Amino acid sequence: MNGQITVMKRLIIALFVSLLFTSCGVGTYSVAGGKSDDALVSVSVSQKITNPVLLEIDGAGYSTNAVFNSNFKKQRDIKKTARNAVTVASGKHEIKVLINGEVVFEKNVMLAPGEHRIIEL
């Protein structure tokens, strides 16, 4: 009878071990992530401006608020700057900034995916 119990124990242990190895989540998994393909453009000014700034990108106009320089620091992620940003596709763009109808900035710029370009006036 002891021989049958030992064989039974071995059979149960072998069954348990085989289930353990076959039930592992071994396989191929795919995870996608990274930065957005879009870029952001913001305007920072040295003097407070009450009127919205017209940001013209490739001929399309966007009205946005400029961020006062004292609220913007290069090493920090300031919410005001991100809130007042315009989202554009990455690549080469012609950017103009107009304040009260006067062009104060005009330049062709290359924007990388995920970049946040801040135009300081």
Image (cartoon, rainbow, N blue to C red):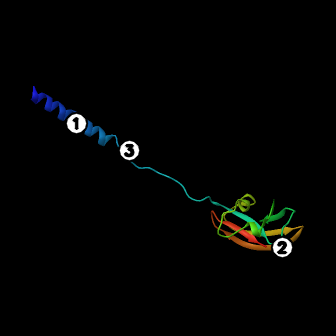
Q: Quadrant of residue 73?
A: bottom right
| Vertical arrangement, residue 24 with respect to residue 60, above or below | above
- Viewer-nearest of labels 1 and 3? 1
Callout 1: few (<14), some (14-19), or many (20+) C-alpha neighbours within 10 Å? few
Mark drawn on residue 25: 3
Q: Amino acid at mark 2?
A: Val
Can residue 25 be spotted in the picture? yes
Q: Quadrant of residue 98?
A: bottom right
Label 2: which residue?
Answer: 104
Q: Amino acid at mark 1?
A: Ile
Q: Position of residue 22 (x, y in %)?
A: 31, 41
Q: Is residue 25 left or right of residue 31?
A: left
Q: Secondary structure at mark 2?
A: strand
Compute the Cα span from label 3 to label 2: 60 Å
**Mark positioned earlier in the residue sequence (1 or 2):** 1
Compute the Cα span from label 1 to label 3: 21 Å
Mark drawn on residue 92: none
Front residue of 59 and 22? 22
Q: Is residue 121 left or right of residue 79?
A: right
Q: Position of residue 79 (x, y in %)?
A: 70, 59
Q: Quadrant of residue 82?
A: bottom right
**Mark positioned earlier in the residue sequence (3 or 2):** 3
Q: Secondary structure at mark 1?
A: helix
Which quarter of the rendered picture does the C terminus lie within? bottom right
Q: Amino acid at mark 3?
A: Gly
Q: Position of residue 23 (x, y in %)?
A: 34, 40
Label 1: which residue?
Answer: 13
